[in-house]
Image (tube, rainbow, N blue to C red):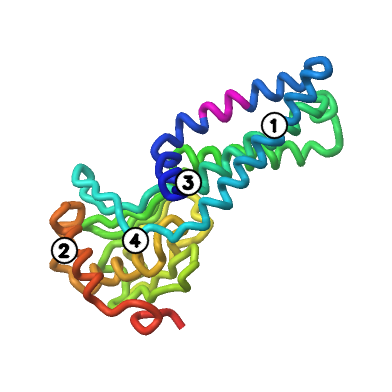
Amino acid sequence: MLAAISAVTVRYRRPILTVALVLAVVLAVGRRLPYPLNSIMSTATLLAVLLALSLAILALLPPRPTAFLVKPESRAFATEPSAFQVYLAAAFIFSASQWLGTTDLGEIVGGPFLVLPILLLVGVGVNVAGGWRGFSVELRPDGVRQRDFTGSLMVPWEALAPGRPFQPAVRASTLALAYAQPDLVRRRGILPLGRRRLRIDNVHPWFIADTIRHYVDHPQHRAAIGEPAEYQRLWHALMSAPTGPGHGHAS
């Protein structure tokens, strides 16, 4: 049930965030109305914040998917965007609505605590942009790519060290990469994790690590990445190989 809700959220993340933004503006304006309407708007805003945060927590509970989106049109296997990011963005949106609805805008502009609304608005912008665009890891015939609204990282297969990466902890949110030829790695924009880590909190850590290692060690299969037949071959190859802490696990 939770997985199905998350899948729908990811699919319709942009309409959901658009509705959240419009509703947040309406609630903030409603806070300026006379009592009891302003009280009703305040309660509704708090409930919206709590609902978004609750859904974000629930999105972290189900096991992460051991699957890729197959994209023949772009010749890629990609992880699915994160529902957690969408819910977190909604929580920031309604938190900003609550704060703006209870604060005198004149005091914000001329007061000594201008940094607080700036930080809040930056948090809203960053999380909404992340939820709107979504982030994912893409495996392509030429390498591994990760892109979000802050930048991109392109790691050619030849740059990765043979037999790596190791499997991280089962709840890991990042995957460490080991390079044989780091000069081949291309980075653009701002990447908070740097050049040697991928964000993987929307896919099972062992699955993504085993897949990358498979293509590092089997270059003959890279050209077929993105094709449904290759995805089936990959799935059977991973399922028949040893897995778990005893196989390629990081110490």
Residue behind mark 4:
66
Task: Kindly identify the amino acid type of the residue bearing the numbered disc 2.
Answer: Arg
Residue behind mark 3:
83
Whichever of labels 2 and 3 marks the residue nearer the N terminus, that label is 3
At which x and y percent is residue 136?
39, 51
The circle on residue 45 is 1
Badge 3 element: helix
Instruction: Tell me the magenta residue range.
Output: 18-23
Q: Residue at x 45, y 40 (%)?
A: 9
| Nearest the eye: 194 or 98 | 98
Is 18 left or right of 221, judged from the image as shown? right
Query: Quick check: is 134 in the magenta stretch?
Result: no
Q: Are marks 4 and 2 in contact (CB under 8 Å)?
A: no
Residue behind mark 2:
233
User: Predominant secondary structure in magenta?
Assistant: helix
Whichever of labels 3 and 4 marks the residue nearer the N terminus, that label is 4
Q: Are marks 2 and 3 in contact (CB under 8 Å)?
A: no
